[in-house]
Structures are given as C-alpha cells and as structure tokens.
Image (cartoon, helix red, strand yellow):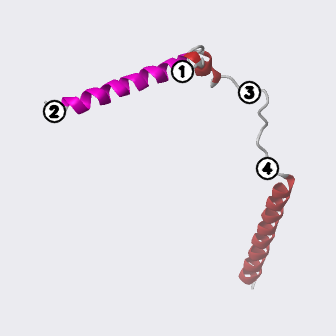
Amino acid sequence: MDILYLLVPITLGLITLAVILFYWTVKSGQYDDLDSQAYRILFDDENDKKMTPPESIIKESKVKTSDTAQKAQSQDSKKDSANDQ
C-alpha cells in the first residue's frame, strides 16, 4: 500500500508530461499534413543531379585500362614467340 504513495504521483506526472507534449506537437503543426510526406518519396526531385565521377577519375581509369591491355598484349606476344621457337 505504501508503494501507491510513490506510484500515483509518478503516474500523474508522466500523464501530465504526455498531455503537454501532445499539445505542443498539435500546436506546432506536426499533424497538419500527414499525406503529402508519404507520397513525396514517389516523385523525383527536379534539382537532383546525376552522380557522375569527376573527369580526372575517368581519365585515370582509361589510362589504367589501356596499361593493363598493353601488358596483356606484350605477355601474349612473348608466349607466342616462345611457342614459335
């Protein structure tokens, strides 16, 4: 029975806090427009830009690709000359 003297005021304090927070959210407009945010994800933003890498990265990848291709050709030519002998 003594625990009720502690639990009742704590419960009343939590209920009061919940009512105050709910009132604050209603007053600040949190519940005014519930539908438009749900549909917003379905539409593309006009200001979004396509993500493309910078030109320097594109040039580096082309250089690396051509270097590996040249190495592969030189290794193939070495194998062919070894097979011819």
Q: CA distance from mark 4 to mark 3?
A: 20 Å
Q: Earlier in the sequence, mark 4 or mark 3?
A: 3
Q: CA distance from mark 2 to mark 3?
A: 60 Å
Q: Earlier in the sequence, mark 1 or mark 4?
A: 1
Residue 32 image offset from top left, x and y in percent: 59, 13
For the image, the number of numbered tags is 4
**Disc marking residue 2:** 2
Q: Relative to 54, does residue 27 appear above or below in the rendering? A: above
Q: Residues within 10 Å of mark 2 (few under 14, many from 20)?
A: few
Q: Residue sitting at 76 percent across and 68 percent down?
A: 68
Secondary structure of the residue carrying numbered label 1: helix
**Disc marking residue 25:** 1
Q: Nearer the viewer, mark 1 or mark 2?
A: 2
Q: CA distance from mark 2 to mark 4?
A: 69 Å
Q: Quadrant of residue 66?
A: bottom right
Residue to which mark 4 is pinned: 53
Q: What residue span does the magenta drawing correspond to? A: 4-26
Q: Earlier in the sequence, mark 1 or mark 3?
A: 1
Quadrant location, the N terminus = top left
Main secondary-structure element of the magenta-colored stretch:
helix
**Disc marking residue 45:** 3
The amino acid at mark 3 is: Asp
Q: Relative to 59, does residue 12 appear above or below in the rendering? A: above
In-image side of 3 versus 33 (left or right): left
Q: Earlier in the sequence, mark 2 or mark 4?
A: 2
Q: Nearer the viewer, mark 2 or mark 4?
A: 2
In-image side of 29 versus 43 (left or right): left
Q: CA distance from mark 1 to mark 4?
A: 43 Å
Residue 11 image offset from top left, x and y in percent: 30, 27
Q: Residues within 10 Å of mark 4 (few under 14, many from 20)?
A: few
Outermost residue to the left: 1
